[in-house]
């Protein structure tokens, strides 16, 4: 059974921010990203378990990668609900803020 694909309001805001990020340097890159999301959504509608299970983050959460972006989604009986769209850059920035040393600097080699 083919499911409908929907975005949460947060996922829509994420998508809009990512498009804006790609639009700044290149309209072509933004179109490529949007087309990639459309293609993945069509695939997920037909094959909802295509993405990786992310139960370690939240039970029932799944993810699929599109270039430098990760779409997080949930599968229900009738829909695929995209809950977040996150770029690798955003993940890297968030991780670097939680590490006890700057990214790219091995422990023991920090400078004061």
Image: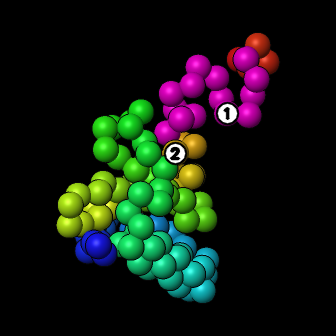
Count of numbered tags: 2
- Per the picture, the main secondary structure of the magenta-coloured stretch is loop
Q: Secondary structure at mark 2?
A: helix
Residue at horizontal 57 percent and vertical 25 percent from the top:
99
Choose mark 2 or mark 1, whichever is in front: 2
Asked whether the beta carbons under mark 2 and mark 1 sit within 8 Å of each other, the answer is no
Which residue is labeled 1 in the image?
103
Q: Residue 77 appears at what percent x and percent y? A: 20, 61
Q: Toward which corner of the image does residue 13 lie, by quadrant?
A: bottom left
**Left or right: 97 as drawn, with respect to 54:** right
Which element carries disc 1, helix, strand or loop?
Answer: loop
Q: Which residue is mark 2?
A: 91
- Magenta residues? 94-107
Given residues 22 and 84, the one toward you in this image is 84
Corner quadrant of residue 56: top left
Q: Is residue 111 above or below residue 63?
A: above
Q: Residue at x 35, y 46 (%)?
A: 61
Which residue is at 55% across, 65% downward? Answer: 66
**Applied colour scheme:** rainbow
- Relative to 44, residue 29 above or below: below
Q: Residue furthest top?
A: 108
Residue 89: where, in percent of width, then height? 57, 52
Whether residue 103 appears in magenta in the rendering, the answer is yes
Which residue shows up at 49% across the image and 50% down it? Answer: 52
């Amino acid at each position: 059974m083919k499911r409908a694909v929907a975005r949460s309001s947060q996922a829509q805001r994420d998508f809009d921010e990512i498009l804006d990020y790609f639009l700044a340097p290149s309209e072509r890159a933004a179109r490529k990203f949007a087309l990639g999301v459309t293609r993945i959504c069509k695939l997920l509608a037909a094959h909802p378990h295509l993405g990786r299970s992310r139960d370690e983050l939240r039970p029932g959460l799944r993810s699929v990668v599109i270039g430098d972006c990760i779409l997080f989604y949930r599968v229900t009986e009738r829909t695929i609900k995209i809950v977040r769209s996150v770029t690798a850059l955003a993940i890297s920035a968030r991780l670097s803020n939680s590490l006890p040393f700057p990214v790219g600097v091995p422990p023991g080699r920090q400078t004061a």
